[in-house]
C-alpha cells in the first residue's frame, strides 16, 4: 500500500508525516523507517522510528533510491512501514518526473508487504495520475 500526503510547500506535510510515523511506531510489530534528505527530524521522531538520512548515501536517481529501499529490505525482513519525506529535494526533480520511483514502490509494496507513506509537494489537481491513485 502507498499513501500520498500532498500539498504545496509550507502546507504542513512534514508535520503530518512525522505524526503519522510516530503513531504507527506505537503499535507496529515490525520496523518503522523514516527516509529523509537530512537528519533534522531526529528529535521529532519517536525512538521506535528508524531515521535514515538518504543524502548521506549519495542517491542521485529514482532508480538508485528504489534500489536503496530494496537493499534495506534485503538486510532487514522486519521492515513494515517506510515513510519518505522530501523526495523532490533529495532527487532534485518535480513530481511529474517520478513515475519510475512510484512504479518501484508499487512493486516493492506488493512483493514485500511493506506500506509506504510519501509526501508530494503539489496541489491535488496537479498530481500526475501515477501519484493521484494513491491519495485517499
Image (cartoon, rainbow, N blue to C red):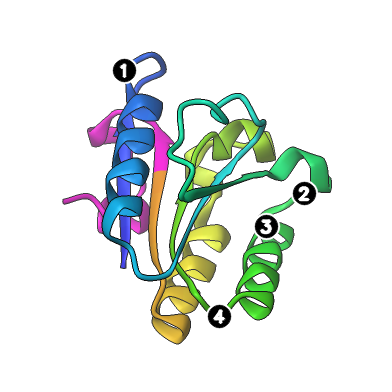
Q: Residue 20 carries which label?
A: none
Pick whichever, 22 or 36, lies toward us. 22
**In this figure, which residue is indicated by the disc labeled 3?**
65
Where is residue 131 drawn, in percent x and y? 35, 52
Outermost residue, top direction? 10
Residue in the picture at 41% in, 47% down: 118
Q: Nearer the viewer, mark 1 or mark 4?
A: 4
Marks 3 and 2 in Cβ contact (< 8 Å): yes
Residue in the picture at 29% in, 28% down: 123
**In this figure, which residue is indicated by the disc labeled 2?**
59
Q: Eyeballing the image, is 118 above or below 6?
A: below
Spatial separation of the CA atoms under disc 1 and disc 4? 34 Å
Position of 54 with respect to 104 (left or right) is: right
Where is residue 117 drawn, in percent x and y? 37, 51
Mark 4 falls on what kind of element?
Answer: loop
Q: Residue 77 carries which label?
A: 4
What residue range appears in magenta?
119-136
Mark 3 falls on what kind of element?
Answer: helix
Q: Nearer the viewer, mark 4 or mark 3?
A: 4
Where is residue 42 drawn, in percent x and y? 57, 31
Outermost residue, left direction? 136
Amino acid at each position: 500500500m502507498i499513501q500520498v500526503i500532498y500539498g504545496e510547500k509550507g502546507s504542513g506535510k512534514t508535520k503530518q508525516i512525522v505524526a503519522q510515523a510516530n503513531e504507527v511506531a506505537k503499535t507496529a510489530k515490525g520496523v518503522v523507517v523514516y527516509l529523509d534528505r537530512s537528519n533534522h527530524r531526529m528529535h521529532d521522531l519517536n525512538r521506535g522510528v528508524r531515521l535514515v538520512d538518504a543524502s548521506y548515501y549519495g542517491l542521485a536517481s529514482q532508480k538508485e533510491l528504489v534500489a536503496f529501499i530494496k537493499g534495506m529490505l534485503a538486510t532487514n525482513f522486519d521492515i513494515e512501514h517506510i515513510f519518505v519525506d522530501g523526495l523532490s529535494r533529495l532527487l532534485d526533480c518535480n513530481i511529474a518526473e517520478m513515475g519510475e520511483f512510484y512504479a518501484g514502490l508499487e512493486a516493492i509494496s506488493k512483493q514485500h508487504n511493506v506500506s509506504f507513506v510519501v509526501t508530494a509537494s503539489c496541489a491535488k489537481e496537479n498530481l500526475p495520475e501515477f501519484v493521484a491513485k494513491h491519495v485517499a
